[in-house]
Amino acid sequence: MTRPTPIPTPTEQPFYDGCQRGELVLQHCNHCQHVVFYPRTHCDACQSDSLAWRVASGEGVIATYTVVRRGVSADFPAPYIIALIDLAEGPRMMTQIIDAEPEAVSSGLSVRVDFESWSDNITLPVFRLLPVQVP
Ligand SMILES: [Zn+2]
């Protein structure tokens, strides 16, 4: 496998460490309570540098998505689904939806985080559709 992998900066490293542990972690601003993603040195709402990492719920809703039908290389077997997820904590995250037929995906569906190992050092968050809740 030769998929490109992120090279985390010191600011980003706690995010990837969380993924390695199977935890989605997000920065929370100690000054204004804003939840920050992607990882930054300062809050993007109030510019405070007092940020704390907390474990997120891992739940979210599909804001929008696209089905990639021709992968960029043989390392990205198509079709696959790239989505923007509105996390329960607020931030929007670009990610992949796995183990779902493209026809089963639509905006507004609930998803939950899972993790996919891309290398010895890099594990990335991916999302799965929640089972349909029948009342
Ligand atoms: Zn803030």
Image (cartoon, rainbow, N blue to C red):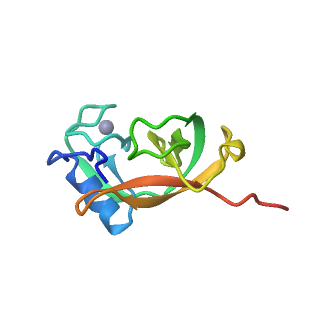
Residue 50, given in percent of the width and then of the height, sits at 21, 45
Q: Which residue is outermost to the front? A: 74
Viewport quadrant of the N terminus: bottom left
- Total label count? 0
What residue is drawn where x is 71% and y is 47%? 104
Is residue 101 left or right of 46 when viewed as pictured? right
Q: Which residue lies furthest to the left in this view?
A: 10
**The C terminus lies in which quarter of the figure?**
bottom right
Q: Residue at x 14, y 48 (%)?
A: 10
Residue 54 or residue 133, whichever sits in front? 133
Residue sitting at x 33%, y 56%: 118
Location of residue 93 by image quarter:
top left
What is the residue that sits farthest to the bottom in this orientation? 21
Residue 91 in view here? no
The correct choice, above or below, for 39 with respect to 1 in the image is: above
Relative to 98, 56 lies left or right: left
The percent position of residue 87, horizontal first and vertical second, equals 50, 46
Q: Is residue 118 visible?
A: yes
Residue 86: x and y in percent read 53, 41
Residue at left 64%, top 50%?
A: 110
Query: Left or right: 22 with respect to 46?
Result: right
Q: In this rendered view, identify the residue nearer to me: 22 or 67.
A: 67
User: Quadrant for ligand 1?
Assistant: top left
Compared to residue 124, the image places residue 70 above or below, namely above
What percent of the width, then of the height, locates residue 31? 29, 42
